[in-house]
Structures are given as structure tokens and as C-alpha cells.
Amino acid sequence: MSETDRNSRYAATSEDFDFEAGDRVLVRVREHGDSGNIEGKFEATVEGFETGVSAVSSDRAVFDPPWDSISGVKFRYYEAEFEVLDDAE
């Protein structure tokens, strides 16, 4: 599947998140969703958002992770902490 086809499956924005498709984000995954020890963190580009029926209860942000993955990594707003990285680096 081409990058264009993959990204067209997702919405460009979501009311649940303070960032949008194309942003570079630091993702901190915590042990208990939004509390507990940080279990992992990575920088990734936001591919888009699963909204509506495909996300069932709330939107999920889809990230292109820094490792090989068949599909993007997906989190709901309460499953991790997100920090938008400044492009001026």
C-alpha cells in the first residue's frame, strides 16, 4: 500500500488531540494509560486519526513509528502523553 493510500484512510484532525496529521510528536506510553511509570517513549509523525465507527468509543491517533511496522501505532488520548515537537530543531 502506498503512503498516499495509507494516509487517505485517516482524518487529518481530531477534537480529542492537540495536534494534527503531519506533526512530529513525542509519545510517552504510561503503565496505566495516563498514570504510572513510563513504559516507553518514541518520536513519530502523526499519520492521521481513526474517527467514528472504526475507533468505537473515541478517536485514535495513528503514528508512523520509528521501527518497521505493517500498520501505524494507535493510541486514544488517555492511553499516552503527547508532546508536539518544534520543527525548528
Image (cartoon, grey):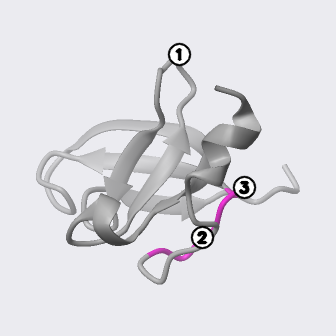
Q: Could you tell me residue 76's position as x and y percent?
A: 31, 61
The residue where tag 1 is placed is: 68
Q: Earlier in the sequence, mark 1 or mark 3?
A: 3
Question: Tags 3 and 2 in contact by the CB under 8 Å rule?
Answer: no
Q: Residues within 10 Å of mark 1 (few under 14, many from 20)?
A: few
Residue at image x 38%, y 47%?
74
Residue at image x 60%, y 70%?
19
- Residue type at mark 3: give it: Gly
Q: Is residue 73 left or right of residue 89?
A: left
Q: Residues within 10 Å of mark 2 (few under 14, many from 20)?
A: some
Please identify the quarter of the rendering in which residue 45 is found: top right
Q: Could you tell me residue 82's position as x and y percent?
A: 46, 60
Label 3: which secondary element:
loop
Q: Earlier in the sequence, mark 2 or mark 1?
A: 2
> Is 46 situated above or below 52?
above
- Residue type at mark 1: give it: Asp
Q: Residues within 10 Å of mark 3 (few under 14, many from 20)?
A: some
Q: Main secondary structure of the magenta part?
A: loop
Question: Tags 2 and 1 in contact by the CB under 8 Å rule?
Answer: no
Q: Could you tell me residue 46's position as x and y percent?
A: 60, 52
Residue at image x 52%, y 44%?
63
The residue where tag 2 is placed is: 19
The residue where tag 3 is placed is: 22
Label 2: which secondary element:
loop
Rounded to the nearest angstrom, the CA distance separating label 2 from label 1 is 23 Å
Rounded to the nearest angstrom, the CA distance separating label 1 from label 3 is 18 Å
Question: Tags 1 and 3 in contact by the CB under 8 Å rule?
Answer: no
Residue at image x 64%, y 67%?
12
Stretch of the chain drawn in magenta: 17-23
Q: Nearer the viewer, residue 24 or 72?
A: 72
Q: Could you tell me residue 31's position as x and y percent?
A: 15, 45
